[in-house]
């Protein structure tokens, strides 16, 4: 199994941030689409997936334990790389004010948070970030242990206005408050940014709309939702075998974790349904070479930037 989370390649990064070259359009997605769809070996990826009426068994559902086990297996070593490309792809993050509040959904081992903070899994993320030179996390990094597809955010994430208008019948909010909030504060005032980086694809497709809706509910009016995930016909998708399909463009790995592969239209529909305005949406297509065997790989990711209406 391979999980590749770097959507582009930084060349000559050691020469300094200003001189680094970022590659994200090495080939055209339409060319890859034509190549895949004309290859009989990939035909099972394209066929409709049997619906409930045509299937005698329900598709397997992922568990939180599957991802906890995944991160325990990869708790050390260099499996995850710091996501230095994020500040290039989402320049709003380094250019925001010092007091900007960012909710990262699916922090994993902290590889995203480390990049942002330079300018069980949560324990590992805390350890990695705490031991990273040049970063002071006091009152800046606050991990929350929860399954965003099944549980609800604590109420202190909401701004006062959003919290008072929040529909309790839809999400029963959790009441605990973190130590960093002063006695005269009831909440952090809502989020300026929500980032969802290679997270949504790990959630069952049927639950994606409600998951996005919950994330949008803690975003301030005018705030940005920054998205990046696997794109249709990415090399990882083409490696899955027929028996690993659990839905249309949805697959389950042998360890029980899910992976979905997005088209631009699917992402557009999901975020528009949540009431967001599309600012950017495109495929990132990257050619890379496996250093061990020299094999060329074609990677595809979807990059998206959405905004909550100012009012």
Image: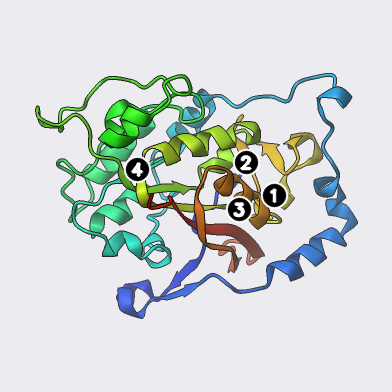
Front position among marks 3 and 2: 3
Which labelled disc corresponds to residue 183?
none
Foreground disc of the pair 3, 4: 3
Instruction: Answer with left or right where residue 243 lies relative to residue 14.
Output: right
The residues tagged by marks 3 and 2 sit, at their Cα atoms, a distance apart of: 19 Å
> Mark 3 to mark 4: distance in Å?
21 Å
Residues tagged 1 and 3 counted as in contact (Cβ below 8 A) = no
Label pair 3/4, CB-CB below 8 angstroms: no
Residue for badge 3: 268
Judge the density around disc 3: few (<14), some (14-19), many (≥20) Cα neighbours within 10 Å: some
Dot placed on the residue nearer the N-terminal end, 2 or 4: 4
Relative depth, front residue between 68 and 280: 280
Cα distance in 3D space between marks 2 and 4: 22 Å
Image coords of residue 121 (percent x, y): 38, 33
Q: Residue at x 28, y 62 (%)?
A: 94
Position of residue 214 in the picture relative to residue 176 (left or right): right
Q: Secondary structure at mark 3?
A: helix
Rendered location of residue 33, percent (x, y) = 77, 63
Compared to residue 226, the image places residue 74 above or below, namely above
Q: Earlier in the sequence, mark 2 or mark 1?
A: 1
Q: Residues within 10 Å of mark 1 (few under 14, many from 20)?
A: many
The residue to which callout 1 is attached is 237
Residue nearer the viewer, 118 or 140: 140
Q: Which residue is mark 4?
A: 103
Q: How many marks?
A: 4
Q: Nearer the viewer, mark 1 or mark 4?
A: 4
Tell me the residue at 30%/51% (across/down): 114
At 58% from the left and 67% from the top, the residue drawn is 288
How far apart, in angstroms, are the residues tagged by discs 2 and 1? 8 Å
Tell me the SS state at disc 1: helix
């Amino acid at each position: 199994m391979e999980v590749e989370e770097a959507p582009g390649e930084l060349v000559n990064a050691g020469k300094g941030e200003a001189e680094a070259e970022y590659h994200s359009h090495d080939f055209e997605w339409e060319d890859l689409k034509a190549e895949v769809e004309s290859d009989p070996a990939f035909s099972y990826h394209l066929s409709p997936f049997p619906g409930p009426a045509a299937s005698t068994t329900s598709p397997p559902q992922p568990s939180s334990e599957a991802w906890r086990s995944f991160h325990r297996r990869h708790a050390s070593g260099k499996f995850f790389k710091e996501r230095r490309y994020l500040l290039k792809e989402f320049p709003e993050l380094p250019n925001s004010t010092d007091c900007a509040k960012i909710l990262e959904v699916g922090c994993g081992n902290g590889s995203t948070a480390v990049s942002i903070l330079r300018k069980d899994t949560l324990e590992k993320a805390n350890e990695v970030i705490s031991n990273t030179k040049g970063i002071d996390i006091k009152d800046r990094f606050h991990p929350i242990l929860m399954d965003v597809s099944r549980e609800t955010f604590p109420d202190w994430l909401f701004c006062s206005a959003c919290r008072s208008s929040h529909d309790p019948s839809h999400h029963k909010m959790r009441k605990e408050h973190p130590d960093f909030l002063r006695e005269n504060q009831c909440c952090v005032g809502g989020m300026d940014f929500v980032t969802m980086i290679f997270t949504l694809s790990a959630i069952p497709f049927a639950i994606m709309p409600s998951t996005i809706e919950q994330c949008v509910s803690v975003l301030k009016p005018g705030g940005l939702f920054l998205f990046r995930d696997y794109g249709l016909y990415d090399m990882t998708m083409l490696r899955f075998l027929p028996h690993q399909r659990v839905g249309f463009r949805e697959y389950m790995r042998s360890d029980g974790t899910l992976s979905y592969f997005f088209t631009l239209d699917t992402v557009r529909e999901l975020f528009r349904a949540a009431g967001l305005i599309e600012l950017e949406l495109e495929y990132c297509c990257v050619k890379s070479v496996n250093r061990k065997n020299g094999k060329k790989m074609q990677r595809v990711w979807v990059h998206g930037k959405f905004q909550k209406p100012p009012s």
